[in-house]
Image: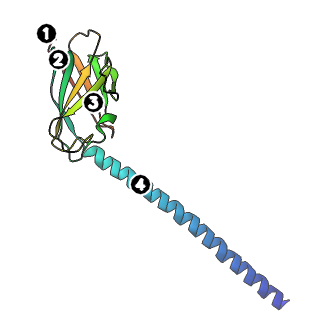
Amino acid sequence: MGFTSVVVEGILLIAAVIAASVFAVAFLTKMSEVKETFLYSMKASVARVKTKVVIAYATYDSSQGLFLVYAKNVGQYDVLPIDKIDVYFGSLGKASLYSYDYDGVFSAGEWSYVELSGKKANVWEIGETIEIKIYNATTIDPPYYVKIVLPYGESVEETFSEAPT
């Protein structure tokens, strides 16, 4: 009886050590996932806080038949990719989401951009001003409203009332 109880205790001890090891591995793996998620969330929050864009000027260009918005990246991070920015435009209180002009054929409800000083394509660099061209085929009444939403979720909006000539 004494030898049997020692063997049983030994087996139970080994089983307990194995169970504790399995639990520790599972726990540490989950903790690592939580840490990675937290770090990603913190980096995204820092980028969001340190990203800032201002609208410097907005007008209607009658020679091109479109609205022009000049916006500058005054934050501490580059904004990329530029073509993933959302642009809302219209009369105040009646703005619509405009699509980026991927095909190069400018049509109603689309926008495109021109980098005025940047060195990297499709990257809105710190301190860079871009010209956003907004093509609106329907007549809209002033005041005009434009809102730019960056890929990180930050946004800037402006109302202007220069009438088309």
**In this view, 84 is above or below 60:** below
Residue carrying label 1:
165
| Residue 105 percent coordinates (x, y) | 31, 23
From the viewer's perspective, tell me whether residue 154 is left or right of residue 35: left
Q: Label 3: which residue?
A: 148
* Residue nearest the viewer, comparing 133 with 38: 133
| Residue 94 against residue 80 in the figure, above or below | above
Q: Which residue is mark 2?
A: 60
Mark 1 or mark 3, which is nearer the start of the sequence? 3
Cβ–Cβ under 8 Å for marks 2 and 1? yes
Q: Residues within 10 Å of mark 2 (few under 14, many from 20)?
A: many
**Dot in front, 3 or 2:** 2
The residue nearer to you, when weighing 157 against 90, is: 90
Residue under pointer 4: 38
Q: Please state the horizontal and vertical placement of residue 94, each as a whole percent of the image.
A: 31, 15
Residues under labels 3 and 1: Cα distance?
Answer: 25 Å
Q: Residues within 10 Å of mark 4 (few under 14, many from 20)?
A: few
Total labels drawn = 4
In the rendered image of this protein, does residue 73 appear above or below residue 90? below
The spot of residue 154 in percent (x, y) is: 29, 37
Viewer-nearest residue: 36 or 19: 36
Q: Nearer the viewer, mark 4 or mark 3?
A: 3
- Please name the residue shown 33% across and 38% down the image: 151
Q: Residue at position x 23%, y 44% from top?
A: 120
Sequence-wise, the earlier of marks 4 and 3 is 4
Which secondary structure, mark 3? Answer: strand
